[in-house]
Image: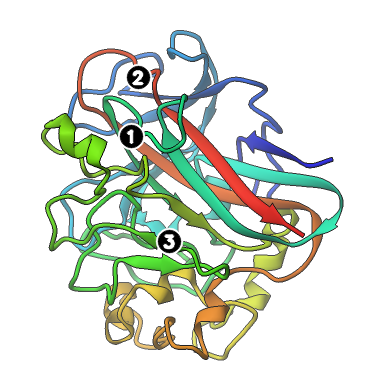
Amino acid sequence: MAEIRFQILGAADGTPNLDTLSGSGLAFYGSSAGSSVQIGAYQDNTYVANSDGSIYKDATNNVKYVASTHPSGMTVTSEAGGSDLTIGLSGVKTYQSTLGIEFGHSTNVNVQNAQLRIYDRTNINYPASGVLCKVAEIINHNGGSYASQGSLGVTSNAVGSGDCFWWGEPWPTQYSTKNYFTNSSGEVFVNGSSAVSNVNGDSRLSAAAVAGSYATVGGTGIVVPLSNSPGSGQKQLQPSEIAGATGGGTTPGMMWPKWTQYVDSAEQSNMFERSDISFGDGSAAANIGKTYGGTGVDTHHTWAVALSSSPLSIGSKEQFGLYVSLEYL
């Protein structure tokens, strides 16, 4: 039997702190648990809660989108019960992610074409109502060190292999060769660039006429791709299998960072402020296959994602859900 479970992460070995949300969801709060997030601001706390956020428990890691920075991909990351760090997405460790997603099966399987959607809890093709949401896949166990990522980056000890830009924010043309990712099934996932005014492109958001409402994951405009076959606890994506993960260099391994598909090869060393970070063009025929993720079979496959949200109006946002689909064989 196959099932998908949503989990709270927090242990460095990948073991979930909470194995399943058990029908509950996540709530995004302001300066304290239960408090509102101001319009135009992003959350400072994330908890497991009921549908309207009035009852909450079990804090999870808070990964907050830092708006109006360039390059994009900046976050304030707060470990549950820990301290804040201002880093690039690539410096967020897997266990510091907002949410774990685990697919389980009774036999060993490969997983491909995994997709994450933000929707209105009625139709997966309809965007959430009254809220912006940024999403990023986190793959970072113990990568090579770097000084910073972007003008606000401070100390982090790793360059991860997941996303380095948020899906749902404008990707900077200064650093990106293209504003899309292609997975192993040939599905193309598009995100708006800093050169366009409508980041999402879904016609329902265009019709909403709310300032800033386009900069979000959701509907048919932006769907987030997740990596192939990460394995239980992401063991198929461990550093020993990732090119350059043990201290730099570009020796091909089982996978290249996901972001090499969309970060210009000429800008990779500038993006991460490391002269030895240059994987080349991940879109080239010889290299693109290295960006898809793991290749091994397992009974369980685990993804880690960062989520950040901001309200467009006053009140609880109950037409706001997360949906994951995948293929297994």
Q: Quadrant of the N terminus?
A: top right
x then y, percent, for residue 189: 40, 60
Identify whether 24 is placed above or below 105: above
Tell whether 215 sits left or right of 43.
left
From where the camera sits, is residue 168 visible?
yes
Query: Which tag, 1 or 2, sits closer to the chain's start?
Result: 1
From where the camera sits, is residue 13 visible?
no
Give the residue drawn at x 25%, y 46%.
66
Tag on residue 317? 2
Label 1 vs label 2: CA separation? 11 Å
x then y, percent, for residue 108: 85, 58
Tag on residue 163? 3
- Dividing the picture into quadrants, the one containing residue 113 is bottom right
- Dividing the picture into quadrants, the one containing residue 44 is top left
Tell whether 251 sits left or right of 301.
left
The type of residue carrying mark 2 is Lys
How busy is the neighbourhood of tag 3: few (under 14 within 10 Å), some, or many (20 plus)?
Answer: many
Is disc 2 placed on a helix, strand or loop? loop
Q: Does the CB distance between marks 1 and 2 fall below 8 Å?
A: yes
Is disc 3 placed on a helix, strand or loop? loop
Is disc 1 placed on a helix, strand or loop? strand
The type of residue carrying mark 3 is Asp
Of the pair 304 and 116, the residue shown nearer to us:
116
Residue at mark 1: 309
The type of residue carrying mark 1 is Ser
- Dividing the picture into quadrants, the one containing residue 312 is top left
x then y, percent, for residue 33: 41, 18
Q: Quadrant of the C terminus?
A: bottom right
